[in-house]
Image (spheres, grey):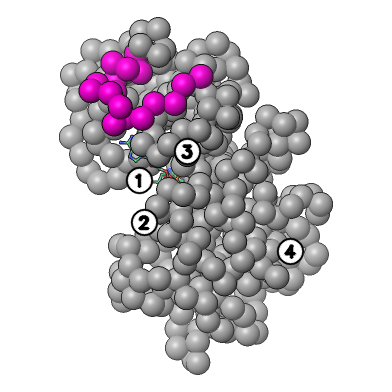
Amino acid sequence: MRIQAALVESAGGPFTVHDVDIEEPRRDEILVRIAAAGICHTDLSTRQVWPPARLPMVFGHEGAGVVEAVGAEVTGVAVGDTVCLSYRSCGRCGNCGSAQSAYCEAGIAALNATGTRTDGSTPLSRDGERVFGNFFGQSSFASHAIAYESNCVKVPGDLDPVLAAPLGCGVQTGAGTVLNVLQPAAGSSLVVFGAGGVGLSAVMAAVSEGCSVVAVDPVASRRAVARDLGAVAALDPADVDDVAAAVRDLTSGGPHSALDTTGRSAVISQAIAALRNRGALALVGIGKPAELDIMTVMTKGIQLRGVIEGDAVPQEFIPRLITLHEQGRLPLEKLITPYPFSRIEEAAQAAAGGEVIKPVLTFA
Ligand SMILES: NC(=O)c1ccc[n+]([C@@H]2O[C@H](COP(=O)([O-])OP(=O)(O)OC[C@H]3O[C@@H](n4cnc5c(N)ncnc54)[C@H](O)[C@@H]3O)[C@@H](O)[C@H]2O)c1
Ligand SMILES: [Zn+2]
Ligand SMILES: [Zn+2]
């Protein structure tokens, strides 16, 4: 079938929309007509480092749409179902069996970020030439995507796809890290470093749990959104000599918990220095290998935890996020700017530049 997809054709190159062909779904696959797709920072950072041998590539891992066809073995979704797409897991290993599919033993990267199916093939091609895809079991920067039961979540048919799309990664990751991992007590203090799509989703979840939330971000408009979402303070790291000391002042001696969404070692050090003794730090941002102040982590008894996708099992957690949204406790529309699919590169630039928090592409 002929579809439209946004290709990245050179290392770090732009997204450009082209006609490509997509195969019929295989026995375990689901063809989804994409109605909306969010842009996550991971799409932008991955295109910079993607192996040139695996180009052209279709990214996109926050798709939402309607099931158009299913393979013979698919039982969990049917043609016509409205779905939101998330990360893919094997469904068979010990972690998948114990509601920890984010740490699937098949490997989150092996199933989500090779550019191919597990057998090395890809459902996409252009003029007979291979196009890489299967990003997070979807590659949803396209009018249609091939997905799997493990990453397809049924959502109400009347849910706006523009709201549904970012639930699949950014919102799930930020809110899940708060609700599933840090589980802060009401009245406790929590600091979020980096007020992008992930960080502001964490802000919303922590505010709705009754926490006193401080956000740290150099971008003024993002700090304003954090305050609007209920953060008690939003700090510009450039405004103070010592970010950790400023955070301690704002949280009566240091926060009980913190999230890093920047992946920057200097910021992680600020979080460790700011936390009160026995505080918890969740590392969510993708970063380079870095040195860690082992003695401070040790002597303060800090609980350090890496987190993938908010520890969420999408089929359980995304419906919970939708309920929170219905209750007005997760006003994610405040993060979203819709763009027509044809303007994907402009949307990506706006997200990278900080002007837009969560661009969501729409498909006519
Ligand atoms: N672990 C996971 O499962 C998972 C899932 C989704 C995204 N991610 C990663 O999480 C990170 C955040 O994603 P996003 O979409 O929110 O990205 P984003 O770029 O929108 O947000 C990052 C924010 O950090 C801010 N920042 C930069 N320098 C800072 C500093 N010194 N102090 C405080 N803030 C600073 C930026 O201004 C920006 O607002 C990315 O690295 C992304 O790849 C991880
Ligand atoms: Zn698994
Ligand atoms: Zn993501």
Look at the numbered discs 1 and 2 and tell me whether their residues touch, using CB distance below 8 Å: yes
Q: Is residue 343 magenta?
A: no
Secondary structure at numbered mark 2: helix
Secondary structure at numbered mark 4: strand
Of labels 2 and 3, earlier in sequence is 2
Q: Nearer the viewer, residue 67 or 209?
A: 209
* Residue at image mark 4: 66
Callout 4 amino acid: Val
Of labels 1 and 4, earlier in sequence is 4
Q: Position of residue 339 (x, y in %)?
A: 59, 61
* Residue at image mark 2: 45
Q: Residues within 10 Å of mark 3 (few under 14, many from 20)?
A: many
Distance in Å between CA atoms under marks 3 and 1: 20 Å
Confirm whether residue 157 shows in the render.
Answer: yes
Ligand 1 closer than 8 Å to the CB at disc 3?
yes
Q: Position of residue 118 (x, y in %)?
A: 46, 67
Residue at 43% of width from left, 20% of height from top? Answer: 257
Look at the numbered discs 4 and 2 and tell me whether their residues touch, using CB distance below 8 Å: no
